[in-house]
Amino acid sequence: MVLQVAVLENLVLSFKTIVCIYSNYEAITAKLFAALNTFVPKVKCKQTNRPPWITSELAKAINKKKTMWKRIKNSRTAANMEKFRKLRQHLKNWIRLERRNYVKNIADEIHSNSKRFWSYFAFKNKAKPIPDKLTYNNTTFSDDRARAEAFNDFFKSVYKDHSRCQVTFDEPVITDNSLCRVQVSVEEISKILSSLDVHKAIGPDKLPTIVLKECAESLAPSVTAVVNFGLRTGLQLTEWKKANVPPIHKKGKKDLVENYRPVSLLPVISKVQERCLVTRLVPHVQEVLYSYQHGFQKGKSCVTQLLEVFHEIGSALDRGFESDIIYLDFAKAFDSVCPAKLVSKLKAFGIGDPLLKWFQSYLTERKQRVVVNGTYSAWTDVGSGVPQGSLLGPILFLLFVNDMPRVVENASLAMFADDSKCYKVINQESDFVKLQRDLDALSTWSVSNELFFQPTKCVNLRISRKRNSPSRNYSLNGISLEVVKAEKDLGVLISSDMTWKDHIVMVVAKANKMLGFLKRNCAGLVNREALLRLYHSLVRSHVCFCSQVWAPQSTVNTLFLVEGIQRRASRFIVGKGSDLSYRDRLIKLRLLPLNYWLEYLDLVFFYKCLNNMVDFTFEFDHYFSFVQGRTRRANAAHCVKTNYARTSLFRDYFFNRIAIIWNGIPEDIKVATTLCSFKRQLKSFYFKRLFNVFDGDNVRSFKIICPKCRRVNILKACSC
């Protein structure tokens, strides 16, 4: 429905000057809400916790059962109890029938109303976001207001007092380019407003997102005037610096307040302004950002960082050397950033007034309140940090920690936002001393920037295959670091011997757990397309995450273990009573075997690497090169060779194994001009393998490279 708000088209003309617009923002919003009250019909929404398949008629029957139980529980005659049992059984059957019909209907509407389809599974999978009883400072809170205040008190304690921070603005200039003035156009604001997601939560101003979206053309001139005035004068609206904060559980017990983190829900219009700034700030600083920083950057991801780091460490392990990885953990990194120091660093990046003054206004005098079940806490001041949930927050944090790698002289520092690790190959005793020296330098940097590490949560992972490795104890801030056998790194479990068995077991357990959830909650669902979509999104996605790093290659047990996930899933999707073999089920469902799919993802990622769709720190000739000179192959230009690997462990690393796989696929697939064309042809190639080669009981058919003898077999099974 298009909202009729013609009265808002020239809202800016209600005031004489732009200064008056800015100082009377409350009057502007008052006019907007008055127009909404006049022209927008209201619908009263009833909040209910009952499942969506419980109709009003069924709800009345349930209430009738409850009333009957209250009446007969004190006089339980045989006749009354029998009558009650019959009613209860009737209701059970009725509820079961309504639920099955509901699931069938949403599955049939998967194309026309996918949101309704996914909301059902979100409803079934979610627990209470916040328990009814919370503990904070040895005190238990149960009502909503008390819980909100407990969260508010904890979040306030996290913020740092930087009032005594001394900033001299003497940071070394990083770039000669400057960014001082920003002016946005009505067309740009209108385009951003038109693209807003109406399903996102609103901020403290309570302006509905759907109104901003549907009335984008009418509101754009007024919003543009306010945004441009703020950027020209270096001031941020006070109302736009307020945020509602829903507590988000991190890990650990859910009834402890300390296990939650704040995420700011800002006014939607303020995020429109942030969008305008992000599109200008990111290109300005892109070239000077630390190359090993893989967080929040286009072309970089968890995969790119893990491949870079562990190819280097794996290469050293292949040569017989050990490596020490120190995983660093900041204490509330995003919430502890000193605003004054951040502004100083922004100046070094070429940000000048009035934009620099605007950033100072944006980062200071912020306020927030916690919301629990619609109940708000009191407002509290935010003395530090960048707003989590904002668009500018991530890039501002990257700029704040961008000079951190400068103090590391001997080791390497890999970063993904606030997750960082300092590592070094240990050839001799002096390497241990050098790594400790870098840790001391990092500790000094953290103190000077008031962004402190938590030494008790920082750990040392020693990568070694030696039976007797000399003891090396590292310390941070005078506290010895714990030596661990395995550590989770960006979602991937890294073992000290660099094998992936523990991670594969963890991934398989997660996928099977989600598959069990689907089996329990999809009873009666016979729509195979819907079941396949659920499998792809909720089960297979666990296996595909960072698979380029850890995908099993030559260990028979792990290959069968991974394939077993889809073996069970295909049996469930096809339905009970089917006597089809695993291969026939895959053909019927148009599914590739899971090990084929992981190999497919390897090749797609490699194609992106070759076509500059992925941003690596090193040039690709650091990892592989193309075949030069005479060869018996028809087209050697597309053949890849890699460095020699002494051990089977390093041979199975991505950049080593991908060369053999890439060389094995047909030439017409390699020369595909677009990613879509490459994917389409590659899928067709693997489906041919499924028809002609794959055997669910023969591990030799699970890969292009035979896991047994390592020979390449394209469209026939290995006979080793």
Image (spheres, rainbow, N blue to C red):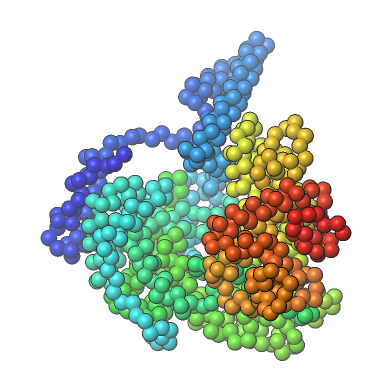
Looking at this rendering, what residue extends furthest in the left direction?
Answer: 16
Outermost residue toward the right in this view = 720
The quarter of the image holding the C terminus is: bottom right
Q: Nearer the viewer, residue 655 or 669?
A: 669
Q: Which quarter of the figure has residue 300?
A: bottom right
Q: Nearer the viewer, residue 408 or 224?
A: 224
- Give the residue displayed 24% in from the left and 42% down from the top: 4
Residue 361, above or below 503? below
550 with respect to 477 (left or right): right
Identify the image quadrant of the N terminus: top left
Compared with 648, 216 (above or below) is: above
Residue at (53, 31) in percent of width and height: 105
Give the image quarter of residue 457: bottom right
* Residue found farthest to the top: 79
Q: In the figure, is residue 370 to the left or right of 690?
A: left
Front one among 400 and 640: 640
Q: Position of residue 101 (x, y in %)?
A: 56, 27
Residue lying at 70% horizontally and 81% vertically, measured from the top left: 425
Q: Position of residue 680 (x, y in %)?
A: 59, 54
Residue 121 is situated, as x and y percent measured from the top left of the image, at 56, 41
Q: Is residue 309 above or below residue 51?
A: below
The answer to whether residue 351 is above or below residue 116 is: below
Query: Is there any visible trace of residue 249 in the rendered image?
Result: yes
Residue 20 position within the rendered picture, expressed as x and y whole percent measured from the top left = 17, 62
Residue found 68% across the figure and 50% down from its top: 687
| Viewer-closest of 403 and 480 | 403
Residue 490 shows up from this direction: no
